[in-house]
Amino acid sequence: KQFFEQIKGKKIAMCGIGVSNTPLILNFLKKGAYVYACDRRSREQIGSIADELEKAGAELKLGEDYLENLEVDMIFRTPGMNFNLPELEAARKKGIAVTSEMEVFFDLCPATIFAVTGSDGKTTTTTLIAKMLEAEGKTVHLGGNIGKPLLPEIENIKSTDFVVAELSSFQLISMRKSPDVAVVTNVAPNHLDIHKDMDEYVEAKKNILMHQNAFSRTVLNRDNDITYGFKKFVRGQSLYFSMEQPLKNGAWLDTGGTIHMAYRGIDAPIM
């Protein structure tokens, strides 16, 4: 509640108009913020969402110069937006706070957070975790780079709930908090047309666990050299998974196709 009280009357630029950002824009308008809905596309390309946002009170800023001369208090990057865009760097130099939905959500969320990143398999893994928690009767909020934005739900999320979020490298690059449970499926060259280089991409992925504590949990791919290399940065408990070798601490697949779970000296077939 305190956050939404603080944004009342503030000028906020939301970058990217689409299915995921629209609920966020509408939510901020309801909370009394003055919202600029910014997008590189034209009104014709955006379609009826533009009319919906204007009717709700948003001011549209469209076209190639959509990020120029923004006189606002805060800019929310869209999940796929390059953190290093010159326009965003210029905004930071002017003292404008540049953030993202996930950054703010992690700061405010009272629930246990599971987050998944990786070059492949993020959506499948995120969905499976959510389904398993739901099967246990838990209240689960699924979001991030999958499904709906989570920030509009923050006032209804309880400390006994669970959040499962898929996070891209673009979301992770500027995160200041880590999830309670971090999962990295693998890391391979990806999005190098947007990231400065492979090193920046790897550092962004690694950021999912860099702000954890002794009570956190991290799950890493033993078969991926880059991912396995993250183990030296783990502050809490680490677990692994492998399709190539037996493990003493994690899940592994034997040559007969049976999945084992090894933990604290006990190895048991589970599937």
Image: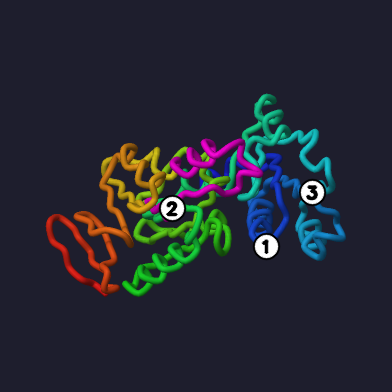
Depicted 234 relative to depicted 30: above or below? above
Residue 15 percent across, percent down from the top left: 70, 47
Report the side of 83 relative to 221 (left or right). Answer: right
In this view, the residue farthest toward the left is 265
Query: Bounds of the magenta span?
Result: 182-207
- Three-letter code for the amino acid on which mark 3 is drawn: Arg
Mark 1 — residue?
A: 19
Mark 3 — residue?
A: 40
Mark 2 — residue?
A: 186
Please tell me whether mark 2 or mark 1 is closer to you in this view. Answer: 2
Neighbours of disc 2 within 10 Å: few (<14), some (14-19), many (20+)? many
Neighbours of disc 1 within 10 Å: few (<14), some (14-19), many (20+)? few
Decide which of 70, 208 is in the foreground and name it: 208
Q: Residue at x 66, y 44 (%)?
A: 193
Residue 222 percent across, percent down from the top left: 33, 52
Decide which of 5, 153 is in the foreground and name it: 153
Which mark is drawn over residue 254?
A: none
Neighbours of disc 3 within 10 Å: few (<14), some (14-19), many (20+)? some
